[in-house]
Image: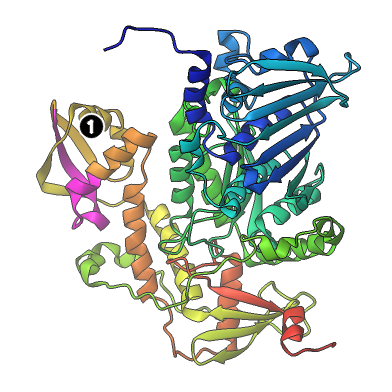
Amino acid sequence: MARIHLLSPRLANQIAAGEVVERPSSVVKELLENSLDAGATQVEIDIENGGARAIRVRDNGRGIDKEDLALALSRHATSKIGSIDDLEAVSSLGFRGEALASIASVARVTLTANTDAQGEGWKVECEGQDMETRLAPSPHPTGCTVEVRDLFFNTPARRKFLRTEKTEFKHLEEVVKRLALSRFDVGFVLRHNQRVVHNLRPAHQVQDQERRAMMVCGSAFMQNAIHLDMERAGLRLSGWVGLPAFSRSQADLQYFFVNGRVVKDKLVTHAVRQAYRDVLYHGRHPAYILYLEVDPALVDVNVHPTKHEVRFRDGRTVHDFLFSTLHRALAEVRPQDQLAQQSNVREIEATSLPYMEQATMPLQSRANYAASSTPAAGRVEEQLAGYQHMRQSVDALEALVAPLEKPSVLATAEEPEIPPLGFAVAQLHGIYILAENEQGLVVVDMHAAHERTTYERLKLAFEQQGVVAQPLLVPVSIAVSDREAGCAEEYADMFIQLGFVVERAGPETLLVRQVPGLLRQADTEQLVRDVLSDMLAQGSSDRIRAHINEILSSMACHGSVRANRRLTIPEMNALLRQMEATERSGQCNHGRPTWTQMTMVELDKLFLRGR
């Protein structure tokens, strides 16, 4: 084995480049973050051959002094932190001081900059061969331009791993989209092979921000999204969340920002998934653009070289805040809210033509986010065989599963206001309700809609009645680890609130003495293990509540009106009014949509009216 020795600066930089510079999109990410940290309000990105041939990023930020240009290409050189205190509360996007040096070690880099005080521009050139810099004067306005050419020219093995030009540009474009969504106050221009792909103006007003979100993620997302802005205990969550019916086959439309930094965090993903669990179709993924603001001292962003991952000081508080906020926001959506959002997006689209025409490449034809498929409306059959033994403990709850109530005063055409879902006019094949509202035609899946309204009434009744506990004649003994046993002791009160009594009987033994009545036939040992696993990972768990909700959902499914049952007009109108007043009425218990709207404009297009 060779003697211990110091690595050469070039080799050290190339090792760092292996972590930081994966492909052209990685270069663009680092350069754009530098531009934003420099206070830029306008950034232009020019790409050639997917970024493999050339990447040019120009901004109007503060620039770099002549004396600092060469130092900027050195490893571990930065202006963003100066002490350990700065590192413990990082507020900038970049701070490691190794991005430019890593890029320069595997490409030919030219850095040109000017500052207000300097008055003249200077440039520094560097190639990966010997890492020596060459300084020369160069005209340039206040700001900075970084040109990266021939990426991986001196590391052929790395260059072989690059994909096609189209694939590399797709990754690169995604980076620009993320940063464009993170900083609405900055304008972005993206060109590929001298063709404008995106031209996004600064967006300071809410409507302009919605326009940018629509141009990046597609109008279909914005038509099916709700805006939220909630603040509690030093945490603030804002942005847009897609309705459950607007789901994706892949997790490709999910943007989450922590203090302006895009992150992919397991705790965040779990909290969001939990919030959608009761309303999302099986196997589908939610869509969202969310912004979390938190004290920088309470989040560690220095856990990964690419800074995509973060670590929260109090993960349980963050998880509970995200879950409760999103869960409540999705629950409060009513049909009138959906119709209002769709109308608002149509207005934004009508005023967006000048913005759209600025791009020579048609946005509609290349935005793969514009269209979102909704789950097939196939029948989902629930089996009650496994729940028959539980029926006696929920007799009181089933008595809420009442037939449709007839309104005391029937809706008439003379009423001054038309409800959001309008008035029923007919029933189609005993399955769908056809209604007329101000926008046009409403089609309602009769069974799915009644299933949701029944399910929500059952949950409300269960909450009011409380958990009915069932003592076990023979306690269930569970062998666990010492850590799991300690967790059970710590969260004993939480188990009691959910109807469980779990006691520690030894260093690695738990005894379950009581379970909720609805779950007395469930696999108690596996359920407790799953809850403890959640507690250790997230600091909370709703497995027990989810189990109870599954039973209530099945009861609601089989207690709702079935297909081919003929309803009278008053009964159909009663169901429409119930939907307007019921939480989560836009989708059934299994995540399928309960209603859809066809506007008069859409109907006119079908029949070529006005042409």
Residue range of the region highlighted in magenta in the rendering? 508-528
Residue 149, how many percent across, how many down? Answer: 66, 35
- Left or right, 70 with reference to 164: right
The structure residue drawn at horizontal position 14% and vertical position 37%, both measured from the top left corner, is 511
Location of residue 386 with respect to 501 vertically, above or below:
below
Question: Which sits in the foreground, 350 or 238?
Answer: 350
Residue 513 on the magenta span: yes
Few, some or many C-alpha atoms within 10 Å of disc 1 (few <14, some 14-19, many ≥20)? Answer: many
Question: Which sits in the foreground, 129 or 238?
Answer: 129
User: Quadrant of residue 237 in the image?
Assistant: top right
Residue located beneath label 1 in the image: 484
The amino acid type found where label 1 is placed reads Glu
Location of residue 171 with respect to 283 vertically, above or below:
above
Residue 527, how many percent across, how many down? Answer: 24, 48
Location of residue 362 with respect to 420 vertically, above or below:
above
Residue 90, how many percent across, how many down? Answer: 60, 20
